[in-house]
Image (tube, coloured by chain):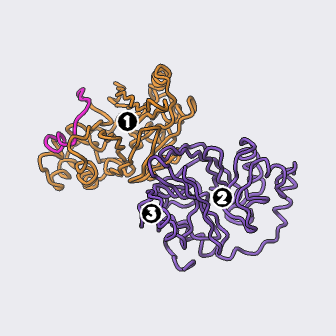
Chain colours: A orange, B purple
Amino acid sequence: MIFRQLFEPDTFTYTYLLGCERTRRALLIDPVASEVETYVRLLDALGMKLIYTLETHVHADHITGSGLLRETVGSKSVVHRDAGAMCADLLVTDGVLLQLGDIEIKVLATPGHTTGCVSYLVGDRVFTGDSLLIGGCGRTDFQQGDAGLLYDSIHNKLFSLPPDTLVFPGHDYKGNRVSTIVQEMEKNERLGAGKSRDEFIGIMNNLKLAYPKYIDQALPANQSCGRPNMELHG
Amino acid sequence: MIFRQLFEPDTFTYTYLLGCERTRRALLIDPVASEVETYVRLLDALGMKLIYTLETHVHADHITGSGLLRETVGSKSVVHRDAGAMCADLLVTDGVLLQLGDIEIKVLATPGHTTGCVSYLVGDRVFTGDSLLIGGCGRTDFQQGDAGLLYDSIHNKLFSLPPDTLVFPGHDYKGNRVSTIVQEMEKNERLGAGKSRDEFIGIMNNLKLAYPKYIDQALPANQSCGRPNMELHG
């Protein structure tokens, strides 16, 4: 499998390119609108055709490139049925298998940061979006966020994966690139080392975070696959 | 590819089993609730695991087996996003590719019989549901049926396929099993031999068909993947 971890520095977003070497088919997880030209050049250089863009959720912090990629290279946009992005081409739910050449993707519903959050499991790699971050997790104070639900998702769906499963998050603000399930179970400051559900809810309810910088543009844009307002990232 | 055309005689419904010989994964197109035990026995005998059930639309004449199969063997139900069956696990739209082992399925939106009708193209076989029948087509006088739209779907999406593409319909009432695109272009009584869009609409608006026998039970049941009323077919 061809694999690239791409970084968008304005919003600290990781985007992942996965490609099947045999069929030359590729997918992108959480593409960013401002980076679409870079993705297209990379796909061309690799000789790959983009079939799917997979969203882990409807983002509040950056605008998805899924709509622009659909128009540019004909890829299809994938998101959870309950994410509120009815612009998407393929709406998935927990447990659904997708396949792209020799790559198999299993959808794990991991709501809590938002209602429609999913993680994508590909072999021994899990792409957790904003559900599980390295040493942390996504906030739960907007977009129907629910700290208790996020705790259950992470414990039941992610911490039950094999311990050496590689964790690839949707963001990192400190330059960390990858973790593992067991590292997060042991070291995650909010969720690891046996923190209880009540402790976690207490932590999440007292974060006192600033209002997200781009949320008022990003949310409505992403409900339309990123196409109503392309000015945000120039 | 393993392939079986199965027949349910009470509603003259064809159900199709497609299986990948290498991965032993299978899908069923338009399974009928009353036949689920037969499908499960057949899958067992073939040594195959059912991954998807694909609906061509929300049926008015029989109850889908998709919900029961989901509960029995864990398969996931696939239907068009606009079909009105939000019980489904995977909601698709025009042009989406799905893959099951070595089998590739392309979704062709063919609305007209119902809003959410699709055909599934697999290699040189197209599974047309009630959009295109052998020598005929599905009625357009309920479920948001639209004769003009059906004419456009069949001409633009189906009659544009290679002429020797095999047409496997959702029903046949006279024992016909398969046709081809060119046979339907030449011989279909409603759509073939150069019939115009206006002629087709005139034909469809004057069919004077009886009210469908099972529609009052089948429609609400199928919007819930066939599970609210299992008594219809015993």
What amino acid type is highlighted by mark number 3? Asp
Q: Which of label 2 and label 1 is nearer to you? A: 2
- Which labelled disc corresponds to residue B44? 3
Residue at (78% x, 72% y) in the render? B209
Residue at mark 2 shares a chain with residue at mark 1: no
| Above or below: residue B53 compared with residue A178 | below
Magenta segment boundaries in residue numbering: A173-188
Asked if the stretch drawn in magenta spans residue B174, the answer is no
Residue A35: x %, y % from top left: 44, 25
What amino acid type is highlighted by mark number 2? Gly
Which residue is under mark 1?
A: A61
Label 3 Cα neighbours within 10 Å, binned few <14 / some 14-19 / many ≥20: few
What amino acid type is highlighted by mark number 1? Asp
B63 sits to left or right of A9: right
Residue B104: x %, y % from top left: 55, 44
Instruction: Give the CA separation, mark 2 to mark 1.
Output: 42 Å
Which residue is under mark 2?
A: B129
Instruction: Give the CA separation, mark 1 to mark 3.
Output: 48 Å
Q: Numbered disc 1: what chain? A: A
Q: Which of label 2 and label 3 is nearer to you? A: 3
Residue that extends furthest to the front in the rendered view of this protein: B45
B155 sits to left or right of B20: right
Q: Numbered disc 3: what chain? A: B
Q: Which of label 1 and label 3 is nearer to you? A: 3
